[in-house]
C-alpha cells in the first residue's frame, strides 16, 4: 500500500516585526509549490477583534475570508500589541491545513531632538525625529529663552534668545509607545569660558619642569559645543623682560587641538600657558595657568640661582650654585669669603625681605606668608657686585 503525503503550502513571511509608532503595511501570502488543486478559500484569523491591524483602512475583524491567496494588513501605529496572523486553507470547502505568521512588536526608534547646538543669530528651529504617530510634545528651555509666538508644543518649534549663555532645551514626549524626556545643550552667542586646567609632568620637582620634560595639560570642564581649541605658550611676564636682561627668550611648542595638549620647551625660563575654544559663533576668552617654571635656574656666566616655589605662598627659597665656570671675579670674591646679598622688593622699591647667603651656605629662605599676594622682584647682589633680578609671584 502506497500512502500519499498531503501537499504542503507555505505562509510568508513566517515572522514579522512591527514598530510601535509607525504604521506599516504587510502582505501575507500563501504559496502553493506543489500545485494543490481545488482551493476554494482562505480563512484568515487575527486572534481577536482588538488585534492591532487595519484592513482596507478600518480596524480589522478577527476573521477575514478571501478567495485570493494574499492579505494586505497595516499595523495600527499606536497599538501596544499586534496579533499573529493565521490562515486556514480550504480545499473543496473543507479545511485543509493551517499556518501562522508570528508577529512581534518593538519600541521603535528613540526620539531625538534635531537642530543647531549653537544660536548665533538670536533664534533657531528644533524638531523631534522618530516621533510616534500619536505623540504629543511639550517643550521647555532654561535661561532667557522664549518660544516664537508663545508656542511650545508640537513636533517643531522656534526658540529665541539674544543672551550669552548655555541653555538646556527639553522635550517631554507622551505616546502610547511610551513617555520620553529628551534634552539638548545649546550655546547662545559666546558665553564666558571658565574652567580649571590640570597639568602633570615627571619631575624634577613639585615646582620645577625639566627642560626636556613634556607637560600634559587637560581642560577640566570642556566648553559646550566647542569645535576645537587653540593652545598658546608664552614667556612670563613677557618676551621684552628677557630681551632687556640679555637672556634667551623662553619658547616652546603645543601639540593638540582638543581638551588635552602636550607642551614642550626649548629654553629654560618662566612661562604662561593659555587656551581658548572655537565655537560656531566665534572664539571664547582665554583661560590658563598663570605661571609655571621650566628649569627654574637662571644662568649668568656660570653663576646660577634658583628661586622656588614661584609662585610662593608661605616661603621662598633662593639657592645659589658657584661652580668652576664662574667668572674669575666671582671665584676671587668667593676666596675672600664675601657673602651674597639677596633682597625681596615690591613694585614701589621698598625692601620687604633682605638677607645674606654666607660663603659656607648655598641657600636662603624668606617667609612670605604675611606678604600680600602680587608681583615682586628678587635682587641678588653677587660678590662681584653685579646685580641679578628676577620677578617673583606671591599667591595665597
Image (cartoon, rainbow, N blue to C red):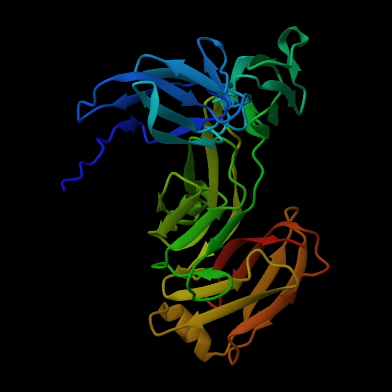
Q: From the viewer's perspective, tell me whether residue 380 is left or right of residue 171.
A: left
Total number of numbered discs in the rendering: 0
Q: Residue at x 66, y 63 (%)?
A: 311
Q: Residue at x 72, y 16 (%)?
A: 153
Q: Position of residue 166 (x, y in %)?
A: 68, 32
Q: Residue at x 20, y 45 (%)?
A: 3
Most foreground residue, 206 or 85: 85
Instruction: Decide if residue 115 is in sight here.
Output: no
In the image, 59: left or right of 348? left
> Where is the C terminus found, in terms of image quarters?
bottom right
Residue at the farthest front position: 1
Foreground residue among 105 and 330: 105
Q: Does 80 appear above or below 63?
A: below
Q: Is residue 181 above or below residue 69?
A: below
At horizontal 75% and vertical 21% (from top left) the residue drawn is 145
Asked whether residue 343 is in view, the answer is yes
Rendered location of residue 126, percent (x, y):
60, 19
Residue nearest the observer in this picture, 234 or 62? 62
Q: Is residue 357 left or right of residue 199?
A: right
Q: Quadrant of residue 383?
A: bottom right
- On the image, the x and y values in percent for residue 204 come to 49, 76
Front in this rendered view, residue 131 or 396: 131
Image: 56 above or below 17:
above
Amino acid at each position: 500500500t502506497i500512502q500519499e503525503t498531503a501537499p504542503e503550502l507555505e505562509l510568508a513571511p513566517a515572522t514579522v516585526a512591527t514598530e510601535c509608532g509607525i504604521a506599516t503595511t504587510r502582505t501575507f501570502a500563501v504559496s502553493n509549490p506543489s500545485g494543490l488543486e481545488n482551493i476554494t478559500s482562505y480563512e484568515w484569523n487575527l486572534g481577536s477583534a482588538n488585534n492591532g491591524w487595519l484592513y482596507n483602512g478600518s480596524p480589522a475583524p478577527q476573521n477575514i475570508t478571501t478567495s485570493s491567496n494574499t492579505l494586505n494588513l497595516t499595523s495600527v501605529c499606536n497599538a501596544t500589541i499586534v496579533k499573529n496572523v493565521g490562515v486556514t486553507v480550504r480545499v473543496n470547502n473543507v479545511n485543509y491545513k493551517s499556518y501562522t505568521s508570528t508577529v512581534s512588536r518593538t519600541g521603535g526608534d528613540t526620539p531625538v531632538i534635531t537642530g543647531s547646538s549653537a544660536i548665533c543669530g538670536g533664534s533657531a528651529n528644533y524638531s523631534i525625529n522618530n516621533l510616534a504617530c500619536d505623540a504629543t510634545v511639550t517643550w521647555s528651555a532654561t535661561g532667557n529663552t522664549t518660544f516664537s509666538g508663545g508656542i511650545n508644543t508640537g513636533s517643531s518649534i522656534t526658540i529665541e534668545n539674544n543672551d550669552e549663555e548655555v541653555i538646556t532645551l527639553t522635550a517631554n514626549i507622551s505616546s502610547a509607545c511610551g513617555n520620553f524626556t529628551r534634552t539638548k545643550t545649546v550655546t547662545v552667542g559666546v558665553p564666558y569660558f571658565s574652567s580649571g586646567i590640570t597639568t602633570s609632568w615627571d619631575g624634577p620637582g613639585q615646582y620645577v619642569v625639566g627642560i626636556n620634560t613634556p607637560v600634559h595639560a587637560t581642560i577640566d570642564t570642556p566648553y559646550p559645543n566647542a569645535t576645537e581649541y587653540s593652545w598658546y605658550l608664552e614667556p612670563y611676564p613677557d618676551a621684552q623682560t628677557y630681551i632687556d636682561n640679555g637672556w634667551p627668550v623662553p619658547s616652546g611648542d603645543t601639540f593638540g587641538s582638543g581638551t588635552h595638549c602636550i607642551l614642550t620647551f626649548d629654553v629654560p625660563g618662566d612661562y604662561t600657558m593659555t587656551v581658548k575654544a572655537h565655537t560656531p559663533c566665534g572664539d571664547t576668552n582665554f583661560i590658563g595657568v598663570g605661571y609655571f617654571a621650566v628649569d627654574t635656574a637662571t644662568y649668568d656666566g656660570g653663576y646660577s640661582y634658583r628661586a622656588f616655589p614661584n609662585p610662593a605662598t608661605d616661603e621662598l627659597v633662593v639657592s645659589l650654585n658657584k661652580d668652576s665656570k664662574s667668572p674669575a671675579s666671582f671665584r676671587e670674591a668667593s676666596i675672600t669669603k664675601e657673602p651674597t646679598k639677596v633682597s625681596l622688593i615690591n613694585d614701589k622699591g621698598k625692601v620687604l625681605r633682605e638677607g645674606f647667603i654666607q660663603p659656607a651656605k648655598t641657600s636662603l629662605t624668606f617667609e612670605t606668608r604675611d606678604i600680600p599676594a602680587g608681583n615682586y622682584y628678587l635682587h641678588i647682589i653677587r660678590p662681584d657686585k653685579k646685580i641679578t633680578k628676577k620677578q617673583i609671584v606671591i599667591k595665597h
